[in-house]
Amino acid sequence: MIRAIKAWARRWWAVRPKLEVRKWFRRSIWIVEAAERPQTLRPHRLYVTRHAHGPAFGFMLCPCGCGETIQLRFMGDRRPRWSLESPSGRPTVFPSVWRQSGCRSHFFVRHGHIDWC
Ligand SMILES: [Zn+2]
């Protein structure tokens, strides 16, 4: 009986941290370097094209799940324009992303996480 409980507890502890990591990972956004606008985008990735002086454009699937592509401009003077920081591949985009059409999602990308507004 005690052995059964111990075995159950061991299994539970073995699974629990994995679930936490999976949940954390699922919510994360990672930087992917791209030569040009990707044909197909996968979720949880921010595809970044670069020019000589830094990031040029970013492309990501809308995190709400609507399937729309969000394009972010990181260079030049035209608006809207965002800044991108990505120490160790976890992007922070500023200011917030606010879609003016479709799902109208409004969120921040901070340290690789989506913070909904
Ligand atoms: Zn959306």
Image: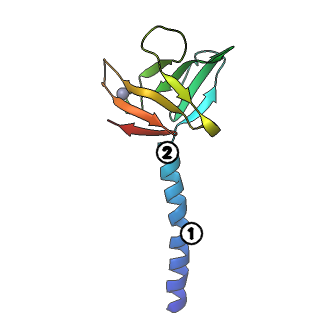
Q: Amino acid at mark 2?
A: Arg
Q: How far apart are the alpha carbons under marks 2 and 1?
A: 19 Å
Q: Amino acid at mark 1?
A: Ala
Residue 63, given in percent of the width and then of the height, sits at 42, 33
Residue 88, given in percent of the width and then of the height, sits at 64, 39
Identify the element where label 2 is drawn: helix
Q: Which residue is mark 1?
A: 14
Ligand 1 in which quarter: top left
In the rendered view, would you say 117 is above or below 47? below
Identify the residue at image location x=55%, y=14%: 75
Q: Which residue is mark 2?
A: 26
**Image quadrant containing the C terminus:** top left
Identify the residue at image location x=35%, y=37%: 116
Residue 72, given in percent of the width and then of the height, sits at 48, 19
Residue 89, given in percent of the width and then of the height, sits at 62, 36
Colouring style? rainbow
